[in-house]
C-alpha cells in the first residue's frame, strides 16, 4: 500500500507540473499578443466596413502583417504542425505568398454561407451610411488605447451582440488612426466612427470621449 501511495504521489506531481507548464506557457503567449495588439492598434475594429479594401487583396500595413504572422506561427506551434516559432513563421509566409491562405479564407466564407466574390470585389461588402471623426481635445502624444471601450462602442453601434438574439450590422465600425506614442495635434482625428443609426451613435459617443488620450 505504501509503495502504491508513493507511485500515485509521483504521478500527481508530474501531472501538476505539466499543467503548470501549460498554464504558464499560455499566459506568456496571451500577454505577448495582447501587448502587441495595443502597440499596433491603429486599425479598423469590427466587420466589413473597413475602408482600406486593399487588405482583402493580400496587401496590408507592415505592422498588421507582422502581427498576423506571429499569431499564425503560434497557432502552427500550438497545433504541433511545426517544432519552433521560426518554422511556424516560415510556413505562415509560404501560405500567404503561395495564395493558399487567401484560398482558405475564400473557402471559409463559402462554408459559412457568405459571398466569396467579395475577395475579388470588396465593393460588394456592406457600406455604412454615416461617419464621424473623434478629434483630439489637445496636442500631445497618444499614451494609451482603451481596447475594451472601443469594443464596447462597436457593440453599441450594432457591430456586435449584447444578447445572443441581437442582430449584427456588418457595415459599422471604428477606424483608429493613431498608435501609442504617436504625436497628435488638437483637432486631429483620433478615430473615425462608421454608423447607420443616429440613436446608436449617441449611445456610443460617451465612450468615444473617454477614449481620447493626449498629454
Image (cartoon, grey):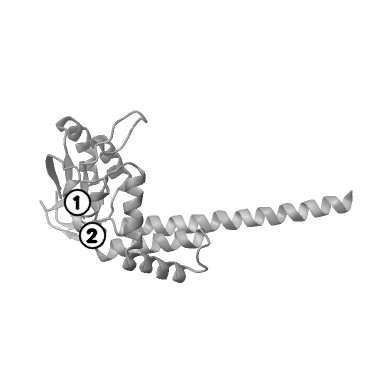
Task: Give the residue at mark 1.
Answer: 122
Point 33% across, 46% down: residue: 110
Q: Quadrant of the C terminus?
A: bottom left
Local secondary structure at mark 2: helix
Point 79% across, 51% down: residue: 8
Task: Give the residue at mark 2.
Answer: 57
Residue 178 spot, x, y in % from top left: 21, 56
16 relative to 95 in the view: left or right: right
Please tell me how crowded label 2 is: few (under 14), some (14-19), or many (20+) other residues with Cα within 10 Å.
Answer: few
Q: Quadrant of residue 150?
A: top left
Question: Do tag 2 and tag 1 residues touch (Cβ < 8 Å)?
Answer: yes
Q: Label 2, label 1: how many angstroms apart (C-alpha)?
A: 9 Å
Local secondary structure at mark 1: helix
Q: Is residue 128 above or below residue 63?
A: above
96 relative to 80 in the view: left or right: left
Q: Earlier in the sequence, mark 2 or mark 1?
A: 2
Q: Is residue 8 above or below residue 74?
A: above
Front-most of residues 174 and 143 = 174
Front-most of residues 166 and 215 = 166
Front-most of residues 106 and 173 = 106
Please tell me how crowded label 1 is: few (under 14), some (14-19), or many (20+) other residues with Cα within 10 Å.
Answer: some
**On residue 205, which mark appears?**
none
Residue 52 spot, x, y in % from top left: 18, 55
Point 14% across, 56% down: residue: 139
Q: Quadrant of residue 113?
A: top left
Point 19% across, 51% down: residue: 122
207 relative to 38 in the view: left or right: left
Q: Is residue 71 above or below residue 51?
A: below
* Residue reaching furthest to the top: 165
123 relative to 8 in the view: left or right: left
Residue 11 spot, x, y in % from top left: 74, 54
Amino acid at each position: 500500500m505504501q509503495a502504491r501511495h508513493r507511485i500515485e504521489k509521483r504521478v500527481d506531481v508530474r501531472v501538476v507540473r505539466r499543467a503548470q507548464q501549460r498554464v504558464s506557457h499560455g499566459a506568456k503567449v496571451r500577454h505577448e499578443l495582447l501587448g502587441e495588439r495595443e502597440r499596433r492598434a491603429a486599425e479598423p475594429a469590427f466587420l466589413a466596413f473597413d475602408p482600406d479594401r486593399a487588405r482583402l487583396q493580400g496587401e496590408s500595413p507592415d505592422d498588421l502583417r507582422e502581427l498576423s504572422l506571429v499569431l499564425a506561427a503560434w497557432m502552427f506551434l500550438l497545433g504541433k504542425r511545426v517544432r519552433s516559432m521560426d518554422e511556424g513563421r516560415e510556413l505562415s509566409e509560404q501560405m500567404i505568398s503561395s495564395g493558399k491562405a487567401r484560398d482558405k479564407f475564400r473557402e471559409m466564407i463559402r462554408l459559412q454561407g457568405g459571398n466569396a466574390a467579395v475577395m475579388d470585389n470588396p465593393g460588394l461588402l456592406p457600406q455604412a451610411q454615416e461617419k464621424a471623426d473623434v478629434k483630439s481635445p489637445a496636442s500631445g502624444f497618444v499614451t494609451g488605447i482603451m481596447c475594451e471601450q472601443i469594443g464596447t462602442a462597436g457593440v453599441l453601434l450594432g457591430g456586435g451582440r449584447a444578447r445572443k438574439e441581437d442582430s449584427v450590422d456588418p457595415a459599422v465600425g471604428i477606424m483608429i488612426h493613431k498608435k501609442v506614442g504617436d504625436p497628435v495635434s488638437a483637432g486631429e482625428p483620433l478615430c473615425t466612427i462608421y454608423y447607420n443609426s443616429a440613436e446608436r451613435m449617441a449611445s456610443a459617443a460617451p465612450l468615444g470621449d473617454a477614449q481620447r488620450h493626449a498629454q
